[in-house]
Image (tube, rainbow, N blue to C red):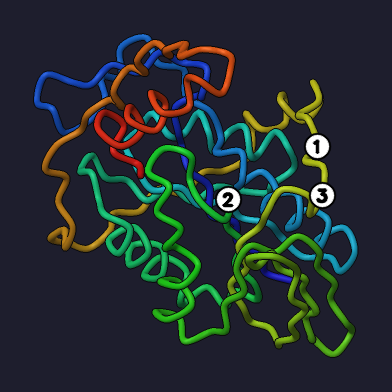
Amino acid sequence: MNIFVCISHVPDTTSKVVIGAGGKEIDPAGITYILNPYDEFGLEAGLQLKEARGGEVTAICVGPEVVKETIRKALAMGADKGLHIVTDEMRDSFGVAKAIVEAIKDRTPDVLFCGRQSIDYDGWQMVGLLGEMLQWPSISVVSKLSFAEDGTITAERDIEGGKETVASKLPAVISTQKGLNNPRYPKLQGIMAAKRKPIEEILPSEYQNRVHVLDLKKPPIKQAGSFIGKGPDDVAELVRLLHEEAKII
């Protein structure tokens, strides 16, 4: 099978984020970048599918030269090769999806995995965009997945208040959720092998963003709580504060 996995190069959640001087992006100084955690579930799903059915796993990433670090991690985990769509420009979700589709549409893919979201922008848009552009079925937020011999997919996906089970056919786009699997850790042998695995570089076509970042702000610092009292005599004051200051009643 020809298996593709979309991966993102994102800031580690433990990093202290500082907004850049322009006010529209974060300052990369001192930030540690990692493979997007939700994409790890997609990569593991692709690797398990390859182990069960044979084939090849290609990890795809859009971004500048530095994203090769993340592609190398995917190769160390077991991907066979990398595909680096090289751009120094910040693209919106539509632009990223367009670049990925242009890169893979003539490579006869059987399935395309991605994480349910990236932990930096939290757009939740990629699976739908990729499915529409490829004219494939797309299944989002998958927490259980099986493949039948005839190419039928059965997937359990998280919905509000419960689970939903759906069936589809390959080729398809699948976004993965925590609980689908336990991503493997790169072993020393895999890390050494990753240095020899190929990473193909391609340039995307020109694109004008449809969505523009106007401003970035950190959330306001939480104010200290107030202690009103202990008994029923303080209820009236509590209600007044909730109404006049907190404005929630």
Q: Work out whether 63 lies above or below 27.
A: below
Residue 172 x %, y %: 62, 78
User: In the rendering, which numbered label is found on residue 184?
Assistant: 1
- Residue 59 is marked as 2
Question: Which quadrant: the N terminus?
Answer: bottom right
**SS under mark 1:** loop
Residue at numbered disc 3: 181
Bin the neighbour count of mark 3 within 10 Å (Cα to Cα): few under 14, some 14-19, many 20 and up. some
Pointer 3 with pointer 2, Cβ within 8 A: no
Q: Left or right: where does residue 211 sit relative to residue 228?
A: left
Q: Amino acid at mark 2?
A: Ala
Percent position of residue 60, x then y = 50, 52
Name the residue nearer the viewer: 210 or 107. Answer: 210
| Three-letter residue code for mark 1 | Arg
- Give amino acid for label 3: Asn
* Residue at 33% in and 62% down: 99
Residues packed near mark 2 inside 10 Å, few (<14), some (14 to 19) or many (20 plus): many
3D distance between C-alphas at marks 1 and 3: 9 Å
Q: Is residue 210 above or below residue 194?
A: below
**Residue 175 position in % (x across, y down):** 60, 62
Rendered view: 168 above or below 120: below
Q: Earlier in the sequence, mark 1 or mark 2?
A: 2
- Distance, label 1 to label 2, CA atoms, is 15 Å
